Image (spheres, helix red, strand yellow):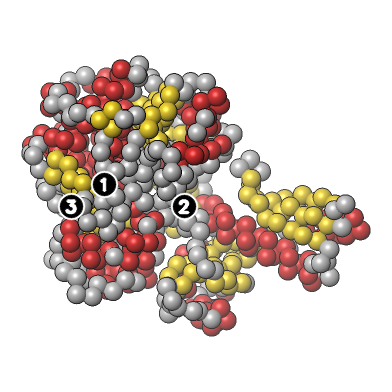
Amino acid sequence: MLKERLSPAEEAAREQEMRQELAACPRILDLIARGPLGNPNAESVIYLRSPLDPNPVILSNEQLMGSVKAAENFFRREGIGKEDAVAILLPSCPAAIAAIWGAAACGIAEPLNLLFTREAIIAQLNAIKAKLLLAPPPGMPGGLYEKIEGLQRDVPSLKRIVIVPLDGTISFDGEVLKPDPAWRDDYGQSKDFSEADRVAVMLPTGGTTGHPKVARLTNRAMVASTVSSRMALDFRKSERCTITLPLFHVGGLFCTVANCLSAGATMFIPGPAGARDPALITNFWKIVEKYHVNINGNVPTALGAIAGVPVGDADISSLRVTATGASICPLEIERRYLATWGGPCIQQLYGMTELAGAITHDVHGIKPRPEAVGTRNPLVELAILAGGKLHTSPWPSPVGELLTRGPQVFAGYVDKKQTEDAFHDGWLRTGDICRIDADGFVYIMGRAKDVIIRGGHNIDPRSIEDAALQFPGVALAAAVGRPDAYAGEVPMLFVSTQPGVQVDPQALAAFVQENIPEPPARPRAVSVIPEMPVTPVGKIFKPKLREIAAGDAARELLAAEGLAKEVNVEAITDPSRGLYLRVNATPDKAEAAGRLLQKFPVKVEVSRTS
């Protein structure tokens, strides 16, 4: 029986536990060694080289943590000190985990986004002045090595590139790292409290190729994040948790990997590609049965895909917890997943890179509230900025931007100017529009940048998306603003379908019109696309959809004026300029095309064909 909320005594006990953990663990290494020290021979990692790998690699706590210490020793021999960065371009595998924590023990680890271009990787390495770069060998899926081959000439600080295999062994440049038993003495027992404020991990979090945004995370922030998730999600000793989010994302590195280690649970890695591997999705329930998975942490898009896979005769009774984050889980996807799984609820959480993970959670044993992302973590303070005024507890709050402060807040970006823009009177600005109810449950209304403004009317895209997801056959839905000469922008809806299902756009449009009570929110255009663009983590990537919407709107306007044949238009998102229209027209039509498109609230760049 789920309770409605935590009692004041339970909240006070959680706050006290957090204070004790922060006092006992000045380093993230002290926290993640907690579980392994309690049971060194228990399994720490189960690693599948692919989702259907019949011979998984299994490492004990002793083997993994000894390898972390061996990795630290390797980095120290390479001259890595507390201010030196080690960049890690590796998918999820035992060697990547050992490398990240080994680098964090003696220097600064930065796991890199695996989908970065070569230019973006170079910019990241120069921003952090990386001394070492770890990457897979040539010829591996994804071509990671091929993207970084020979880039030392473009990164003056880079001492060398270290090759790391993805076969489950832990070796650097052919040197097999022999587990060092000294980890038992060096991790879990530090009394150097100056380490709490040391930056030990950096993570990429947006920005541009020319000006990358890199978040600097202290040991204190990482410890607070990990303890919060462990308490809320009820990680238990010896249970198995899926590791499907990438290690360059806080959900992968802290909410699952660090949680498993600190609780003495087992990391189950069902392939280096995680939830991006179609074979994992189509075989998910069989894999849960075979490996007795207890905790499934995944993004909403992955849960939606898994929900479409029949359980069949698979015994999935071991699966006790499902948690999701990175973006809000639509109610329809939640309904589908619960109907397939049969569990009581999906625990939602909310956070960001700058917070080393989540700052709100649905707490295990507490009944989630529809569309909420739980309540605040212990020692986390929340505020709502609305109408120029800062609102704090007691709640409820008005709708406004969510701000936060507390031990989880990062130490700023590598670029100090970016840091200045991130805070308001000492509070970190999240950029998310929220409200908080009388019991402290947080509701994310949307990103400030995602709100569609139609003739001065603010539209929450989720109202459109939730309606579309109720239409049979729709798997994912996203609404964005489409440029409009009269209203500034109007809603446009994009959907992708469930495998093997066809959706009639006209029938979908009619359905959505009927199920959205607010007339301005009814989409002007509906598009069924083969595949929804997503980020490396699995969030729907709306900038790409805005490009499609802007291009369609421009071509429609040009066609209405008889200019479609003589004018070519392309919508582009530039990191420094934002969304703009690149127009190429015949000399006699260029001026007319440019003048016509100036009616849109989008920058226009016109060139003439020869």
Q: Is residue 415 left or right of residue 187?
A: right
Mark 3: secondary structure:
strand
Q: In the rendered structure, which amino acid carries the disc numbered 1?
A: Thr
Residue picked out by circle 3: 240
Residue 352 at what x, y percent from top left? 39, 44
Query: Which residue is tagged 2?
Result: 535
Question: Looking at the picture, does residue 12 appear above or below residue 609?
Answer: above
Q: Quadrant of the N terminus?
A: bottom left
Mark closest to the chain's N terminus, 2 or 1: 1
Q: Residues within 10 Å of mark 2 (few under 14, many from 20)?
A: few
At horizontal 29% and vertical 50% (from top left) the residue drawn is 49
> Separation of disc 2 and disc 1 at Cα?
19 Å
The local crowd at label 1, few if under 14, some if 14 to 19, many if 20 or more residues have their Cα within 10 Å, is many
**Residue 562, position in %: x, y?**
84, 70
- Can residue 452 be seen here? The reply is no
Quarter of the image for residue 522 reads bottom right
Q: Is residue 34 left or right of residue 502?
A: left
Q: Secondary structure at mark 1?
A: helix
Q: Residue at x 59, y 66 (%)?
A: 491
Mark 3 and mark 1 in contact? Answer it, CB < 8 Å.
no
178 on left or right of 398: left
* Residue at 44 percent of width and 55 percent of height: 539
Amino acid bearing label 2: Thr
